[in-house]
Image: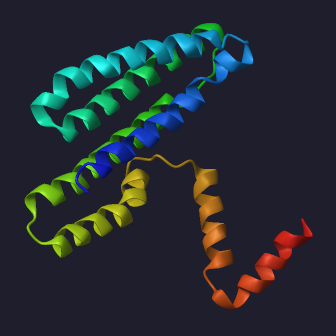
Amino acid sequence: YTVVPLLSFTFILKGMNYMFSLGLHYVKKTRYNAYIVSVVAILNILLNIVLIPEIGIYGAAITTIISNIVMVMAFYHYSQKFYYINFELKRLYILFSVGTLWLLGGFLSDWYLESVWSALVIKVLLFISFPFILSLLRFFEKIEVENLSGAWKKWSKPSRWIENIKKFEKH
C-alpha cells in the first residue's frame, strides 16, 4: 500500500507521454516512439539492477518513475523538434508540481502517522485543497472558472438532475 502512490504517479507521466508524442504521430515519425521506448526500457532495467537490491520494491517504483520522467522529456523534445505544439508549459508545470507535492504529502502521512485514520484525514484534506491551491496559484483561466461555476449551479440541486439528464439526451 505504501508503493501504490508512487506507482500511481506513473499514470500521470504516461498521460503526459501520450500528449507529448502527438507531434511524432502527426508527422508520421513514429519510429522515434520505438527508439525512445527502447532506450527507456534499457534505462529501467539498469536502474532496477542497481536499486532493487538496495531498497526492494521502492527501488522498482522509483526506477519506474525515473524512467517515465526520462520518457516524457524525450517525447517532448523529439515531438517539438518535428512538429511544434504550443503547450501551456507554465500551467502543466504548476499542475505537475502541486500534484507531486500533494502526492508526497499523502505518502509521508503513511510513513509518519501511526493511525490509519489520521493519514486518511490528511489525504482527504489534501484532496479537497488541491483545486483551491491551484486557484491561489492562478492556474485556472477565467472561462474555466465560469464553466465550473455554471456546472455547479446546474448540478448542485438534485431535484434538477433528471431535467439536466434529459437535456443531454436531446443533444
Residue 134 relative to residue 100: left or right:
right
Image coordinates of residue 146 in percent, x first then y, are: 63, 60
Q: Is residue 52 above or below residue 168?
A: above
Image coordinates of residue 49 in percent, x first then y, are: 22, 21
Q: Residue furthest bottom?
A: 159
Count of all numbered marks drawn on residues in the image: 0
Q: Is residue 96 above or below residue 41?
A: below
In the image, what residue occupies the spot 17% across and 27% down?
A: 51
In the image, what residue occupies the spot 39% across and 60% down?
A: 132
Picture quarter with the C terminus: bottom right
Picture quarter with the N terminus: bottom left
Q: In the picture, residue 47 is in which quadrant?
A: top left
In the image, what residue occupies the spot 20% across and 33% down?
A: 59
Residue 33 relative to residue 11: left or right:
right
Q: In the picture, residue 148 is in which quadrant?
A: bottom right
In the image, what residue occupies the spot 44% across and 47% down?
A: 138
Q: 123 or 132, which is in the foreground?
A: 123
Image coordinates of residue 66 in percent, x first then y, are: 31, 27
Image coordinates of residue 160 in percent, x first then y, are: 72, 86
